[in-house]
Image (cartoon, grey):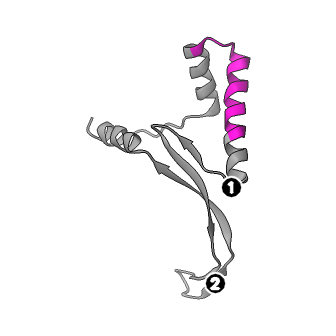
Amino acid sequence: MTEKTLTRMDLSEAVFREVGLSRNESAELVENILTHLSDALVAGEQVKISSFGTFSVRDKAARVGRNPKTGQEVPIKPRRVLTFRPSHLMKDRVAEGNKR
């Protein structure tokens, strides 16, 4: 399986080809969408994209971890983490892709 990364440029190029906006307008549209999504997540909101999945922010409590090499206990500070839960349709599409 070859590793390919989908970038902002790839997204804006797809918008340019599919929608017909100029390259600059397409890049601006993609940038605005990503900014809007990230702003909502920073504010603690859930971002649900139908047929794709749900992004949410979760607060994790402080805990004691362990260094796997030395076994020494290390305190882990409380933090916020981003989680993604794919929709059933997305799970099915990915599973179908594995069968090829």
- Element under disc 1: loop
Magenta stretch holds residue 45: no
Which of the 4 quarters of the picture holds residue 99? top left
Q: Residue at x 61, y 50 (%)?
A: 46
Residue 26: image location, x then y, percent = 67, 21
Which of the 4 quarters of the picture holds residue 39? top right
Who is closer to the viewer here, 43 or 79?
A: 43
Which quadrant: the C terminus? top left
Three-letter residue code for mark 2: Val
Count of numbered circles on the image: 2
Numbered disc in front, either 2 or 1: 1
For this orientation, the residue located farthest to the left is: 99
Magenta stretch holds residue 26: yes
Q: Which mark is residue 44?
A: 1
Q: Main secondary structure of the magenta part?
A: helix
- Element under disc 2: strand
Gap in Å between the C-alphas at discs 2 and 1?
28 Å
Give the labeled residue for mark 2. 74
Which quadrant: the N terminus? top left
- Above or below — where is 32 with respect to 86? above
Q: Residue at x 42, y 38 (%)?
A: 2
Three-letter residue code for mark 1: Gly
Nearer-N-terminus badge (2/1): 1
Q: Residue at x 61, y 11 (%)?
A: 20
Q: Residue at x 64, y 32 (%)?
A: 8
Residue 76: image location, x then y, percent = 65, 78
The boundaries of the magenta stretch are: 19-36
**Residues under numbered marks 2 and 1 in contact, where contact means CB atoms less than 8 Å apart:** no
How packed mark 2 is, by other alpha carbons closer than 10 Å (few <14, some 14-19, many 20 or more), is few
Residue 10: image location, x then y, percent = 59, 27
Residue 81: image location, x then y, percent = 62, 61
